[in-house]
Amino acid sequence: MAKRSNNTNQISLFPETVYEYHILLSPSDTIKEEVDALKQTLHEMVGIAERDRKSIAHITLLKTEGYESMDMKAMIKNAVAGEKKFTVKLNGHSHFEHGAERTFYLQVEDPEPIANLVDLIRNPTKKRQPKIVNRQTSIIDRPVRPKPKKPSMIPHVTIARNIAAADFERIEDFTPFEDYQAEWLCDRITIRRRVAGTDKHFSPAGEVKLG
């Protein structure tokens, strides 16, 4: 049986496994079921890929790779320490254009809290901006409120991706998607992973609860 060498300069004969991590927000079971129904509606209109029909509704924060020895959960927990739970509201639909293909999705009404989580996870050492405390002030010492910054990403719940533009243009009635509204209390970040470079299903790799 091979033993671990005490020589730290020695190259391992068994390279460490690299994982692809999918960090996301997961809605309530009710919303997942409703999104499944919307996927079926779209499928009946233009036909969508099986992987889209089977994909469970979620909001992707980011995907990244890391070694098995990395404690991804601890890293994310430290990055978002002090962040509070918040309400995610879905309201209507939109789409991304990728050349001759379209990604159809449900819109998030207020993307800022989600984009903030992404920024914190991507830049864990970034200094947080102090929150403005409302107090009575004179015109002289009244602080200038910073302009709202443009979100660094567009949080969304994908219904289907890689829809041919010609098929997308055939959709005559967007009413089921325009009328869709839902919300849930986001109180945790979900982590999944799979071996990098494979098409295997992602497996649960932990959760980080928000305050």
Image (cartoon, rainbow, N blue to C red):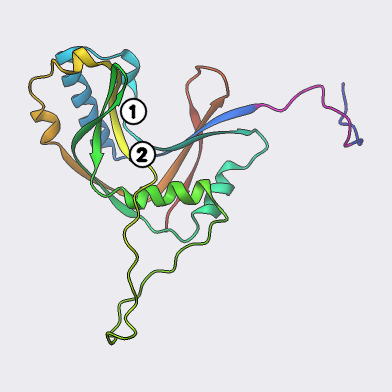
Q: Amino acid at mark 2?
A: Ser
Query: Residue 10 magenta-drawn?
Result: yes
Query: Which residue is rendered at x = 52% and y = 30% of the image?
Result: 193
Where is residue 165 drawn, in percent x and y?
23, 16
- Residue stretch in magenta: 8-17
Which secondary structure is most common in the magenta stretch? Answer: loop
Residue 26 tag number: 2
**In this picture, residue 188 sits left or right of residue 21:** left
Q: Which quadrant of the rendered structure holds the N terminus?
A: top right
Where is residue 164 drawn, in percent x and y?
26, 14
In this view, which residue lies farthest toward the right?
Answer: 7
Query: Which residue is rendered at x = 54% and y = 17% of the image?
Result: 198
- 115 shown above or below 126: above
- 100 shown above or below 79: above
Proximity of marks 2 and 1: CB atoms separated by less than 8 Å: yes
Secondary structure under the numbered disc 1 in the rendered image: loop
Secondary structure under the numbered disc 2 in the rendered image: loop
**Pointer 2 or 1: first along the chain:** 2
Query: Which residue is rendered at x = 27% and y = 17% of the image?
Result: 163
Where is residue 109 drawn, in percent x and y?
23, 46
Residue 56 tag number: 1
Density class for disc 1 (Cα within 10 Å; few <14, some 14-19, many ≥20) is: some
Q: Which quadrant of the rendered structure holds the C terminus?
A: bottom left
